[in-house]
Image: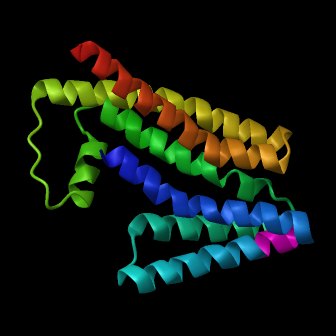
């Protein structure tokens, strides 16, 4: 499923956030931001060396990381850096909303890019099922985005890190496990 691939694509973007929290605890916010930005750029370079090409999502994510990191450094306020996951999720929410509520299914179009060698035949019932799932994901991701923004402003760095990163993966793991069980029980 292309959404799972998109989550895997988002994981490298979360690593600089973990690095920031650790560096912030050791050396303070300013050095933490520098370390996170340098880590993000290094990650982009290593991905290029490993894969032999740049992935557009990782390029976008790294540029965004550097921009918000530099803004946070210049303004001496880490809130811009902390809002990065929420802004990325907001963009994903827009893509999901367009895909779920309009004839233009951007998620399905993106899946062709990542699954080039797979033949996919999607029926009308299949498209309706995909749109229903996208609506559920949109609701979950929208609520998570709001929670991420709240945690960036009003919670500790550790709570923000858990909410903006790990919590999303836990929620989707539970959602997919629940769906798996639902279809297994339905077959009985």
**Camera-nearest residue between 87 and 128:** 128
**Camera-nearest residue between 45 and 183:** 183
Judge from the rendering whether residue 149 lies leftward or rightward of residue 174; answer left or right.
Answer: right
Give me the residue at 69% from left, 50% from top.
83
Judge from the rendering whether residue 108 lies leftward or rightward of residue 176; answer left or right.
Answer: left
The span shown in magenta is: 28-34
Q: Is residue 87 above or below residue 26?
A: above
- Give the colour scheme shown: rainbow
Expressed as whole percent of the image width and height from the top left, the position of residue 21 reads 79, 60
Expressed as whole percent of the image width and height from the top left, the position of residue 159 reads 78, 43
> Residue 146's image quarter?
top right
**Camera-nearest residue between 130 and 83:** 130
Residue 28 shows up from this direction: no
Residue 110 shows up from this direction: yes
Q: Quadrant of the C terminus?
A: top left
Give me the residue at 50% from left, 56% from top.
10
Expressed as whole percent of the image width and height from the top left, the position of residue 105 reads 26, 39
> Residue 72's image quarter?
bottom right
Q: Magenta-highlighted stretch: main secondary structure?
A: helix
Expressed as whole percent of the image width and height from the top left, the position of residue 28 reads 91, 67
- Let me know if residue 108 is in the magenta part: no
Judge from the rendering whether residue 31 lies leftward or rightward of residue 184; answer left or right.
Answer: right
Judge from the rendering whether residue 12 lies leftward or rightward of residue 119; answer left or right.
Answer: right
In the picture as drawn, the residue positioned furthest to the front comes out as: 188
Q: Is residue 122 above or below residue 39?
A: above
- Let me know if residue 30 is in the magenta part: yes
């Amino acid at each position: 499923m292309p959404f799972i691939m998109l989550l895997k694509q988002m994981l490298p973007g979360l690593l600089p956030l973990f690095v920031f929290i650790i560096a912030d605890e050791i050396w303070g916010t300013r050095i933490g931001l520098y370390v996170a930005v340098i880590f993000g750029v290094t990650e982009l370079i290593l991905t290029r060396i490993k894969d032999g090409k740049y992935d557009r999502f990782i390029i976008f994510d790294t540029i965004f990381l550097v921009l918000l990191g530099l803004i946070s450094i210049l303004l001496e306020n880490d809130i811009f850096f902390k809002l990065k996951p929420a802004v990325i999720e907001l963009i994903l929410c827009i893509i999901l909303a367009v895909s779920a509520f309009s004839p233009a299914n951007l998620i399905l179009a993106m899946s062709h890019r990542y699954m080039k060698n797979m033949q996919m035949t999607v029926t009308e019932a299949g498209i309706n099922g995909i749109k229903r799932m996208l609506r559920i994901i949109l609701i979950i991701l929208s609520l998570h985005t709001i929670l991420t923004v709240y945690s960036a402003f009003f919670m500790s760095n550790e709570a923000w890190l858990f909410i903006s990163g790990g919590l999303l993966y836990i929620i989707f793991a539970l959602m997919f496990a629940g769906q798996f069980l639902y279809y297994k029980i339905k077959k009985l």
